[in-house]
């Protein structure tokens, strides 16, 4: 299994020990006990995943999360919160900000390993595409701004009205342009679920397909296999 670079920003000694025992042998784990130390590390290292506590000696994890996203806009570093805060409001705030996951303390070694491995693999798969095109048919894909533009009848670019889920779905298809992806992989990489109703995926794909109609980009159903994004110039 690939060894990923993980930065854990955590000041509690007990949790640091658990992180070392759980992840230290499998991955390249670096632990920082405060935000200033984390900034110094990030100047020299770009990790594959960050585990981030919310309440730290020299600042707030949410504010640091925004700082990370501003510095590493493309591609973003996946961030998983580790925190004692278990109330729903805190979780909603984290996910609304773009967190990959939210793990409440205390947590088990097995849960931590499973979640970290899944998120690292997911991030690696999305970023493994060697080339993410900005122009596809009559579409312009701006990954950094998280926008897709479509040329209208006058040749002007207008924003394609995609929901956040449809954009994530389109982003995943673009990263695997010309390759058939299964519903299982879509569920794992777009919804972060190992089990997901096929009808839900099909409904979102159908909506996305309608929105990219007549753009020179096709979203084809491959019987018993999944979906394939390609241009109408490509043979399938």
Image (tube, rainbow, N blue to C red):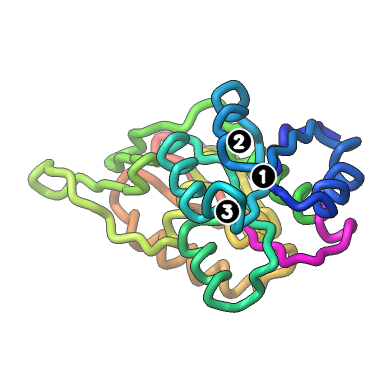
Q: Is residue 20 magenta?
A: no
Magenta residues? 100-114
Tag 2–tag 1 contact (CB < 8 Å): yes
Kindly state the secondary structure of the residue where label 3 is placed.
strand
Residue count near mark 3 (Cα–Cα under 10 Å), binned few <14, some 14–19, many ≥20: many
Q: Position of 64 compared to 136: left or right? A: right
Report x, y in % for residue 186.
62, 56
Q: Which residue is mark 3?
A: 227
Residue positioned 47% across, 35% down in the render: 72
Q: Position of 135 compared to 49: left or right? A: left
Residue positioned 36% across, 33% down in the render: 134
Report x, y in % for residue 70.
41, 40
Number of numbered discs on residues? 3
Marks 2 and 1 sit apart, C-alpha to C-alpha, by 7 Å
- The label on residue 112 is none
- The label on residue 38 is 2
Q: Residue 160 versus residue 86: which sits nearer the camera? A: 86
Report x, y in % for residue 136.
36, 37
Marks 1 and 3 sit apart, C-alpha to C-alpha, by 38 Å
Kindly tell me whether residue 13 is visible in this rendering. Answer: yes
Relative to 226, say whether 202 is above or below.
below
Q: Earlier in the sequence, mark 1 or mark 3?
A: 1
Q: Is residue 106 magenta?
A: yes
Residue positioned 83% across, 60% down in the render: 111
Q: Which residue is mark 1?
A: 9
């Amino acid at each position: 299994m690939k060894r990923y670079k993980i930065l854990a920003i955590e000041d509690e000694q007990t949790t640091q020990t658990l992180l070392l025992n759980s992840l230290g042998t499998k991955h390249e784990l670096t632990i920082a006990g405060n935000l200033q130390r984390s900034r110094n590390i990030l100047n020299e290292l770009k990790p594959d995943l960050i585990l981030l506590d919310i309440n730290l000696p020299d600042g707030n994890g949410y504010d640091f999360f925004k700082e990370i996203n501003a510095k590493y806009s493309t591609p973003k570093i996946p961030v998983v919160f580790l925190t004692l805060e278990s109330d729903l409001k805190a979780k909603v705030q984290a996910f609304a900000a773009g967190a990959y996951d939210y793990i409440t303390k205390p947590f088990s070694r097995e849960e931590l390993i499973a979640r970290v491995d899944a998120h690292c693999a997911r991030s690696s798969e999305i970023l493994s595409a060697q080339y993410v095109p900005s122009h596809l048919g009559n579409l312009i894909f701006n990954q950094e701004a998280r926008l897709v533009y479509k040329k209208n009848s006058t040749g002007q670019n207008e924003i394609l009205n995609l929901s956040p889920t449809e954009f994530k779905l389109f982003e995943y298809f673009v990263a695997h342009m010309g390759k058939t992806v299964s519903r299982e992989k879509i569920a794992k990489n777009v919804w972060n679920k190992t089990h997901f109703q096929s009808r839900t995926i099909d409904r979102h794909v159908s909506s996305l397909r309608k929105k990219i109609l007549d753009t020179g980009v096709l979203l084809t159903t491959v019987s018993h296999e999944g979906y394939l994004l390609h241009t109408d110039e490509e043979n399938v």
